[in-house]
Amino acid sequence: MSQCISIHVDQVGVQIGNACWEFHCLEHDIQPDDQMPSDETIGGGDDSFSTFFRKTGTGKHVPQEVFVDLEPTVIDEVHTGTYRQLFHPELLLTGKEDAASNFVCGYYTIRKKIIDLVLDLNHKLISECIGLEGFLVSHSFGGGIGSRFTSLLRE
């Protein structure tokens, strides 16, 4: 069983991630309330949903993802959107300020405030995986939190 962890960084990454999760849900017939109408009949035992989702003991299908942005507006849209029940609030990380498309500001602000938290969450998600194949990272380029955070994450 191949599994992927998705990391969505900054405004662009969070918006892309939000759209991707909607498509993953449509593809695997997972409802906005994180349930499948009938796990036994859909797909005849197909567990392909487990590439992106983890099934909990209570029957919920939880995305294996982390959303990160220093500015809370876009993540607030995820909190209030159609698929809000899918996402665990602990995995929607936000700060109180923006890096203002400044590479250096994004680098130092993130290092001090959020990189350790994101790494801890990634380790938690990794420990819950059975067959981790890799990470899918969506972010912007050209300064600010998206480019620098991804650089920090890869270090």
Image: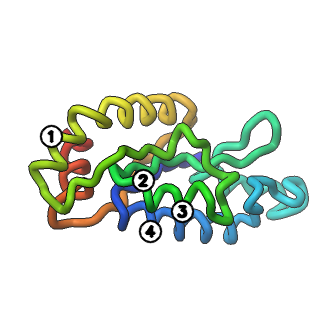
x and y percentages locating residue 142 in the rendered image: 16, 66
What secondary structure is marked by label 1?
A: helix
Q: Amino acid at mark 3?
A: Glu
Q: Please give the residue where the numbered disc 1 appears in the rendered image.
A: 108
Q: Are marks 1 and 3 in contact (CB under 8 Å)?
A: no
What secondary structure is marked by label 4?
A: helix
The mark lying in front, picked from 4 and 3, is: 3
Q: Are marks 4 and 3 in contact (CB under 8 Å)?
A: no
Q: Residues within 10 Å of mark 2 (few under 14, many from 20)?
A: some
Q: Amino acid at mark 1?
A: Tyr
**Real-space CA distance between mark 3 and mark 2, rounded to the nearest whole angstrom:** 9 Å
Q: Please give the residue where the numbered disc 2 appears in the rendered image.
A: 72
Tell how many labels: 4
The mark lying in front, picked from 1 and 2, is: 2
The mark lying in front, picked from 4 and 1, is: 1
Q: Please give the residue where the numbered disc 4 appears in the rendered image.
A: 16
x and y percentages locating residue 131 in the rendered image: 53, 39
Is residue 130 found left or right of 14 in the rendered image?
Answer: right
Instruction: Name the quarter where the C terminus is drawn.
Output: top left
Q: Please give the residue where the numbered disc 3 appears in the rendered image.
A: 77
Q: Amino acid at mark 2?
A: Pro
Mark 4 or mark 2: whose residue is earlier in sequence: 4
What secondary structure is marked by label 3?
A: helix
Q: Residues within 10 Å of mark 3 (few under 14, many from 20)?
A: some
As drawn, which residue projects farthest toward the left?
104
What secondary structure is marked by label 2?
A: loop
Q: Residue at x 61, y 43 (%)?
A: 88
Q: Residue at x 50, y 46 (%)?
A: 92
